[in-house]
């Protein structure tokens, strides 16, 4: 049977999962909602807290900076207390800090609470992928698609929830997230049993050692530049569009729908036909072109390019996740932690740098830099194509490597 099209293995295969998998995936949807939740209300937060766009952008920077650093401890923690307790600890932190975010009296307080939220999100998200892959029926390919489905749905719903609740007050989306996460906490506590702990406990340095593998290091480096472009779109575009919460929420909802569809339905078929590296390189080049046009187009063009970027981001997310989990011989949680440790730094840098680049130059230049970053990611894929060859994938498929990998 061909690899890369889990739906050919039976569309019901990905749906027939244990309750523990669905509970974890459902909580993952809410966790990913928290990333895009603030998008449509960024201007409202700036007005409500009398903050500048560059100050408000720190909501993303503090969140992802702590998330990146925390990746080094997630495996250390989960290998000692177990996946279930790690998930619950992460969910508890998100509940507490999301609720506190809604009570913020200054942008400084909100930035600090988002940092605590980022710690909880790191513990939950990194562990949830390993739990879903370990517990899901249908193999790792189906599990990854289920995880990407949760990511896409969360990314799509986050701006919509933020717009609906944020139309009344910018504080309500934070309280809403805390309430939804509390439901997720109860579901995980009820349906997820204790996970088997690894025979060997993970050390704090294991994720960094895993990056010594050329393939994983190359995937992480390319993903770093890709994530810079990704989060320039996510964090800076709302200020450029300058729409109402409902308008911005609708744009990013459409963006998230494309992200979900292309990550789950389109990416596997493109990989099957053209090979992972060709698809990844081409998608990164198209994303680079898209964000540059976004930066120089009129308002309508900017909306169209913002929505369209979701398609390229969806493809990239799926291929990068597969590469990170399969390109090296490191245990999946360790490989994932090392990979995420590198790429989330770009997610922290882009929201902070984009407004400052605009202040130093003009509104177009942040998107030019983002386009150059995506193109650099594509260049790394091409230059390091031998190291990035997904050996495990090719052995399972029983076919020769795609031409790009030769």
Image: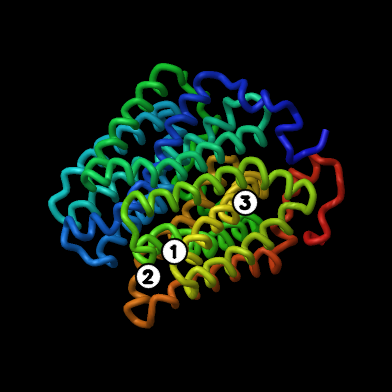
Circles 3, 2 touching at the beta carbon (< 8 Å):
no
- The mark nearer the N terminus, 3 or 2, is 3
> Where residue 222 appears, x then y in whole percent?
59, 62
* Residue at x-position 17% and y-position 57%: 49
Q: Would you name the residue on which mark 3 appears?
A: 315
Of 253 and 149, the residue lying toward us: 253
The correct choice, above or below, for 333 with respect to 309 in the image is above
* Residue at x-position 50% and y-position 41%: 151
> Where residue 221 appears, x then y in whole percent?
56, 62
Look at the image and tell me whether residue 346 can be seen: no
Of 93 and 263, the residue lying toward us: 263
Look at the image and tell me whether residue 235 can be seen: yes
- Is disc 3 surrounded by few (<14), some (14 to 19) or many (20+) residues within 10 Å? many
Q: Tell me the mark number nearer the camera, choosing from 3 and 2.
A: 3
> Where residue 292 appears, x then y in whole percent?
53, 72
Q: CA distance from mark 3 to mark 2?
A: 25 Å
* Residue at x-position 73% and y-position 49%: 270
Judging from the image, what secondary structure is the residue with disc 2 in?
helix
Judging from the image, what secondary structure is the residue with disc 3 in?
helix
Judging from the image, what secondary structure is the residue with disc 1 in?
helix
Q: CA distance from mark 3 to mark 1?
A: 18 Å
Quadrant holding the C terminus: bottom right
Residue 11, image quadrant = top right
Q: Would you name the residue on which mark 2 appears?
A: 353
Of 299 and 161, the residue lying toward us: 299
Q: Would you name the residue on which mark 1 appears?
A: 232
């Amino acid at each position: 049977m061909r690899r890369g099209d889990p739906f050919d293995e039976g569309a019901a295969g990905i749906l027939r999962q244990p309750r523990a998998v669905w509970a974890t995936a459902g909580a993952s949807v809410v966790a990913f909602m928290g990333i895009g939740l603030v998008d449509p209300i960024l201007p409202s937060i700036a007005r409500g807290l009398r903050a500048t766009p560059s100050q408000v952008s720190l909501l993303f920077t503090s969140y992802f900076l702590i998330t990146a650093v925390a990746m080094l401890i997630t495996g250390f923690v989960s290998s000692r207390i177990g996946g279930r307790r790690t998930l619950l600890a992460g969910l508890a932190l998100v509940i507490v800090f999301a609720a506190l975010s809604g009570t913020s009296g200054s942008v400084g307080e909100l930035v600090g609470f988002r940092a605590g939220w980022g710690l909880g999100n790191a513990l939950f998200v990194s562990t949830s992928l390993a739990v879903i892959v370990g517990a899901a029926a249908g193999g790792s390919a189906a599990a990854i698609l289920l995880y990407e489905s949760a990511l896409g749905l969360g990314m799509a719903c986050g701006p919509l929830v933020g717009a609906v609740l944020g139309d009344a007050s910018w504080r309500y989306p934070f309280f809403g997230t805390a309430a939804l996460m509390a439901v997720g906490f109860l579901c995980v506590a009820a349906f997820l049993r204790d996970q088997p702990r690894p025979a060997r406990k993970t050390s704090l340095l294991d994720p960094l050692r895993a990056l010594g593998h050329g393939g994983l290091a190359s995937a992480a480096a390319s993903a770093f530049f890709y994530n810079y472009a990704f989060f320039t779109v996510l964090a800076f575009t709302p200020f450029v569009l300058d729409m109402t919460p409902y308008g911005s929420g609708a744009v990013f909802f459409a963006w998230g729908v494309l992200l979900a569809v292309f990550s789950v339905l389109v990416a596997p078929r493109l990989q099957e036909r053209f090979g992972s590296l060709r698809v990844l390189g081409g998608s990164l080049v198209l994303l680079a072109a898209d964000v540059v046009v976004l930066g120089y187009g009129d308002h309508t063009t900017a909306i169209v390019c913002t929505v369209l970027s979701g398609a390229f981001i969806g493809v990239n997310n799926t291929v990068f996740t597969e590469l990170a989990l399969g390109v090296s011989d490191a245990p999946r949680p360790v490989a994932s932690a090392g990979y995420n440790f590198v790429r989330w730094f770009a997610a922290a840098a882009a929201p902070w740098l984009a407004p400052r680049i605009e202040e130093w130059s003009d509104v177009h230049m942040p998107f030019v830099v983002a386009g150059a970053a995506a193109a650099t990611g594509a260049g790394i894929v091409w230059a390091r194509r031998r190291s990035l060859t997904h050996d495990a994938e090719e052995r399972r498929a029983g076919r020769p490597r795609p031409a790009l990998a030769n």
